[in-house]
Amino acid sequence: MTPYIHYSKRADSLIIYFEKPVPAISHDCDGVFWLRIDTEGKIVGIEIEGFKKHFIPKYTVGKKPSP
């Protein structure tokens, strides 16, 4: 299994597919990240918006958690 990883600097969005990208919908997980789910209901990847601006500062090990 070879993951597909794409970061859009313009959108500050990181997408990771566990295999070759396929059409999928996004399911919000508490505003932290989105699960990418294919038409058969299988989780095929994750998407993180605001990756550098919000996600990295909030979840970097050794830093105080953001409120």
Image (cartoon, helix red, strand yellow):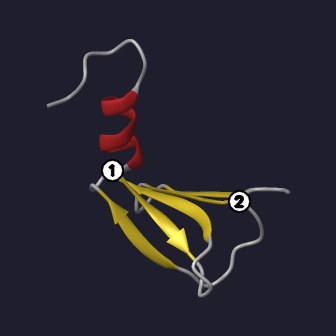
Q: Residue furthest top?
A: 62
Q: CA distance from mark 2 to mark 1?
A: 19 Å
- Judge by depth and name the residue closer to the eye, 18 or 6: 18
For the point 27% across and 56% down, the residue is 31
**Marking on residue 57:** none
| Residue 27 picture location, percent across and down | 40, 70
The quarter of the displayed image where residue 67 is located: top left
Residue 19 location, x and y as percent? 76, 65
In the image: residue 1, left or right of residue 61: right
Q: Which residue is mark 2?
A: 18
Residue sitting at x 40%, y 42%: 52
Amino acid type, residue under disc 1 in the picture: Val
Hey, what amino acid is under mark 2?
Answer: Phe
Tell me the element at label 1.
loop
Judged left or right of residue 35, residue 27 is: left
What residue sits 40% from the left and 62% below the top? 11
Q: Which residue is mark 1?
A: 32
